Amino acid sequence: MKVLQINTVSGIGSTGRIAADIHSILLEKGHESFIAYGRGKTNDLVNNIKIGTKYDNYHHVVLTRLLDKHGFGSKKSTHDFIKEVEKINPDIIHLHNIHGYFINIKILFDYLKRANKPVIWTLHDCWAFTGHCTYFDYVDCNKWKSQCSNCPEIRSYPSSLLVDSSQDNFLNKKEIFTGVKNLTLVTPSQWLANLVSQSFLKEYPVKVVNNGVDTKVFKPTKSEFRSKYNIENKFIILGVASIWDRRKGYKYFEDISSLIEKDEVIVLVGLSQKQKEKLPENIIGISKTHNVKELAEIYSAADVFMNPTLEDNFPTTNLESLACGTPVITFNTGGSIESIDERCGIIVENQSAIDLIRSIRMLKKSDISNKDCLNRSKLYNKENIYNHYIDLYTQSY
């Protein structure tokens, strides 16, 4: 069996690591596997295929920023890529994120409809069935159920600065993404599966396959992290994100910084230089890292992982924290709660700094143990989770 995966990145970031893990399992089982990606550096994986160039990416960014035409650039690079796909002649095509300034969705789906090969499409967010945004619950928008227009999140990723094309985008995506004869959608959370059933993608079967975690890498790990930052005797409240913005709950860390006690400290990983320069004294800011061993060390050093996301699919950060033995506090939003139970964390009903602080105090006094977190993380061991994809490929083939 020959499988081609397509994603924004390969081997880095949450979706890139997922694609790489599936790739490794396929190769271990004797199958042929390829990953096509559009941006960034990649780990040294065999059969990696780069789509387009930096120039193509930049041009697609400009098209998005000025005209809100995300997904409709990269024409030449996509035509060139399709020629490569035809040479590979895969048995299964597995899409992940196809937004990210690297591929033309119409050209891609014209090929998929013409080739009539089995297609698996893992939705890592909601972009596939909206006219612009990747998430909408946290701004209480339901236009995606009927027809997008006048998008309230036009300045959010993939941001447009001048034009709102959300209505045209919605209609075009509906036409482009529907009508593929052999397509199965996969969502990492039941929350997203429920949304898909209300969207124009409801014609397709939907399978829920949770994200997985590499428990050989993300595990309790000793390090010099506490001594490096002179916080040996502090209770560490950790936050990790690729980009810290409003949806990820960045403001809640700022809010609780004035409420935490002297024996407590906040550590935020993934901050921009500008954000780091504006931090209160009791927040330690760390830049984004793709070094998974370093991440495991930081998770392991923390006393609690706080994920105040206002909307998310099935955050791999929750899984990584649990696998390192660190309990999770998260808001009752999206699919973030699906990996947590009362033995390994706390679900906060109200989106407020006061309730987060109360939950931190509760957790400090609770009997949640490192062992409980580790046991929960075993449910999401990547080998067990991603073998579901191999079964899905086999059923579709």
Image (cartoon, helix red, strand yellow):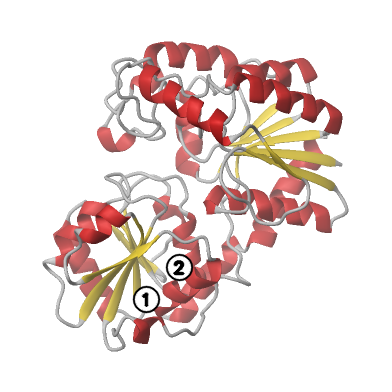
Q: Which residue is mark 2?
A: 321
Label total for image: 2
Q: Say which label, 1 or 2, has the lower sequence index.
A: 1
Q: Is residue 269 left or right of residue 234?
A: right
Q: Quadrant of the N terminus?
A: top right
Q: Residue furthest front?
A: 55
Q: Residue 273: x and y, percent?
A: 31, 56
Residue in view at x 68 percent, y 15 percent? 110
Residue nearer the viewer, 353 or 358: 353
Q: Which residue is mark 1?
A: 302
Q: As shown in the figure, which amino acid type bears the numbered disc 1?
A: Ala
Q: Within the image, what quadrant is residue 321 found in? A: bottom left
Q: Within the image, what quadrant is residue 292 found in? A: bottom right
Whether residue 36 is situated above or below residue 304 in the rendered picture: above
Q: Quadrant of the C terminus?
A: top right
Q: Residue 127: x and y, percent?
A: 46, 30
Residue nearer the viewer, 145 or 40: 40
CA–CA distance in space, label 1 to label 2: 9 Å
User: Can residue 209 be seen at all in this image of the molecule?
Assistant: yes
Q: Residue 360: x and y, percent?
A: 24, 71
* Helix, strand or loop at mark 2: helix
Residue in view at x 32 percent, y 49 percent? 248
Residue in view at x 78 percent, y 52 percent? 46
Whether residue 68 is situated above or below residue 252 in the rendered picture: above
Mark 1 and mark 2 in contact? Answer it, CB < 8 Å: yes
Q: Residue furthest left?
A: 258
